[in-house]
Image (tube, grey):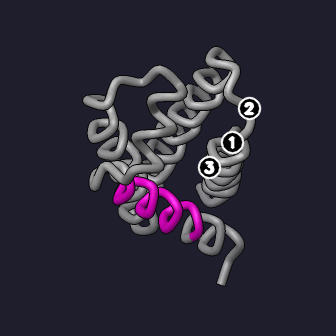
Amino acid sequence: MSLYLVVAGVTIVFNLAAAVADLTRARFVLDNSAELGIPPRWVVPLGLLKAAGAVGLVVGLAMDVVGLAAAVGLVLFFAGALAVHARARVFHNIAYPGVFFALAVATLVLGMGRT
């Protein structure tokens, strides 16, 4: 099994889990979004973006260009999440979007090596 498959698999699982938490409006998600100044009505659409990224990575296992596009989208999404944390000065849990960002970057870099 290639390193790409392992990293992409972890990225997929993490993003699907985060999307489920968003889509079910888990209490910790709503509390975190409130602390960051994100309106509750944005939680579900943000979860749909995470789910779309994960599904794109799954499709990308068969179609490289789709996987690369999904990885770019997730990199941009989590770069934005890190920026929102910094803007709001909420650093106690910045590791969470940091891990997701790192996974997305790793998936993108390793995916670029597949083409």
Q: Is residue 18 magenta?
A: yes
Give amino acid for label 3: Phe
Give the alpha-carbon distance from disc 1 to disc 2, as whole Å: 5 Å
Q: Quadrant of residue 11?
A: bottom right
Which one is in front, 50 or 1? Answer: 50
Residue 112 image offset from top left, x and y in percent: 64, 50
> In percent of the image, x 40 and y 50: which residue is there?
27
- The label nearer to you, 3 versus 1, is 1
Q: Residues within 10 Å of mark 2 (few under 14, many from 20)?
A: few
**Residue denoted by label 1:** 93
Give amino acid for label 1: Asn
Query: Which stretch appears magenta?
Result: 10-21
Residue 10 image offset from top left, x and y in percent: 59, 68
Q: Which of disc 1 and disc 3 is earlier in sequence?
A: 1
SS of the residue under disc 1: loop
Q: Is residue 111 left or right of residue 59?
A: right
Q: Does the magenta stretch include residue 11?
A: yes
Can I make out residue 112 in this image? no
**Residue denoted by label 3:** 100
> In percent of the image, x 34 and y 24: which residue is there?
39
Give amino acid for label 2: Phe
